[in-house]
Image (spheres, helix red, strand yellow):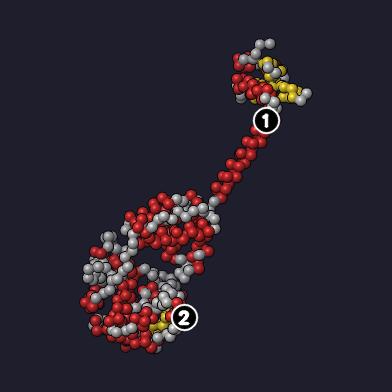
Amino acid sequence: MPALTELALKALKAEADGQTLRDGGNLTGKVRVKVSGAVSVSFVYTYKRDGKFRDLSCGTWPSVSLKSIRLARDAARSLLEQGVDPAERKRVNKLEARAEEQAKIAQLQQHLARPTLRAVYQQWVTAELSNRKDQGAETKRGIEKDVIPVLGDRHADDIKRADIMAVLDKVKARGANRLANRLLAELRQLFSFALVREIVTGNPTIGIEKKHVGGAEVERDRVLTESELRALRSALEAANLPDSTKAALWLQLATACRIGEIIKARRADIDLDAATWVIPSEHSKNGKPNVVHLSAFALGHMWTLVALSGSSAWLMPASKGDRHADLKGITKQVSDRQLKYYDRTTPHSKRTATHRNALALGASRWTPHDLRRTAATLMQACGILPAIIEKCLNHTDENRIRRTYQVHDYRDEKRQAWDLLGQRLASLSSNNVVVLTALTASH
């Protein structure tokens, strides 16, 4: 019987249903006709193994060409010549293919199950940042603004050094070099957290140094000179500042406290009769309370803030809601009025449109924190011992032995230091102390 051809197969009619076709070489095909009239032929290769005849499927025409069907038959015959059962080999191949497919699926599932940087960050916030005094507010603000929108949906263990540098370069490009350095330090902590927990296999921040990012940070040493302090009163009055901001800045100068401690102050922590203000541990940077004596100079400005606060529980309440004012608000107001020292030309508030340099004093910018340094320097000029100044600043003694064994609170010495500071400020700024009788009446 001549070998089959593609033309002969295409010529098959419905009447051929059930017929067996022979192609030679033990290759036979069974004709099947569907209800639709479509014809197909299923081919098998018949061979003898261990005294038994076996059939091996070689494909179904027309889904598989006749040529391919014959190649499958020839491959099976070659295996037989090598002593291998083609049916058994086909079964093994199917099992191997299934195992390989399952392995790929498992690998894909494992890949999809890997946590994203966003998920690792949230885990870090819960496990680490939530235990910090400020609940990690500053850290979260920077990472959620500059890192998460760019890398948050990437798998944490896929993030490379180049990805980190791309983020930090953008921060640096807008002139925020110090923030870029801080972000580097925070990302280093985040990836160290992930590395210890085997979420990632390496820390992509390793090898990145400050010199690659924002550069070495120059420690600020800005102190307002006596001539600048004399000019400060007029500058503050001409700068279109809220009365509460002016009083807060004078109070900071008079107490050497942090501007954030003033903004977060509660009315309940202030005793105007005793002229004291208690900064609780939760509001101080080192977690230790500080009892601040209010000199006559400081008390006048504290009275102003108390009068302006109305019925609020906060000394400097926010305009809306039962909370204190924005911690960065005063710093922004001060910088908006010294724009000639900054790269930006647009202030944070339209209120400063015509007062962009009203607070410019001397050859360089000053910040509220510089007033704290200025206050400490004035104390030093008044002859106050460094140890007393450190206590007024509520600094933690770096010497562990001294910190452990010398625990005198220096309350009287601190009171004297603040009084001397107030007297000095009063002499440097005439007509800037509020009349207490008028405030008492309004209060």
Quarter of the figure that contains the N terminus: top right
Q: Would you identify the image quadrant in which residue 24 lies?
A: top right
* Residue 299 x, y percent position in the rendering: 34, 84
At label 1, which amino acid type do we have? Arg
Quarter of the figure that contains the C terminus: bottom left
Dots 2, 1 in contact, CB < 8 A: no
- As displayed, is residue 443 above or below residue 168? below
* Residue 131 x, y percent position in the rendering: 50, 68
Residue 205 left/right relative to 215: right
Q: Residue furthest top?
A: 1
Q: Which mark is residue 268?
A: none
- As displayed, is residue 78 above or below residue 136? above
Q: Circle 2 — which element?
A: helix
The residue singled out by tag 2 in the image is 404
* Gap between marks 2 and 1 measured at Cα: 80 Å
Q: Would you identify the image quadrant in which residue 412 lies?
A: bottom left
Q: Residue at x 24, y 81 (%)?
A: 428
Q: Residue at x 74, y 22 (%)?
A: 48
- As displayed, is residue 109 above or below residue 377? above
Are there few (<14), some (14-19), or many (20+) residues within 10 Å of tag 1? few
Q: Residue at x 68, y 17 (%)?
A: 25
Q: Would you identify the image quadrant in which residue 384 lies?
A: bottom left
Q: Circle 1 — which element?
A: helix
- 239 or 77: nearer the viewer: 77
Q: Residue at x 32, y 68 (%)?
A: 219
> Is residue 317 visible to us here?
no
The residue singled out by tag 1 in the image is 89
- 392 or 246: nearer the viewer: 392
- 438 or 174: nearer the viewer: 174
* Residue 199 x, y percent position in the rendering: 53, 55
- 61 or 202: nearer the viewer: 202
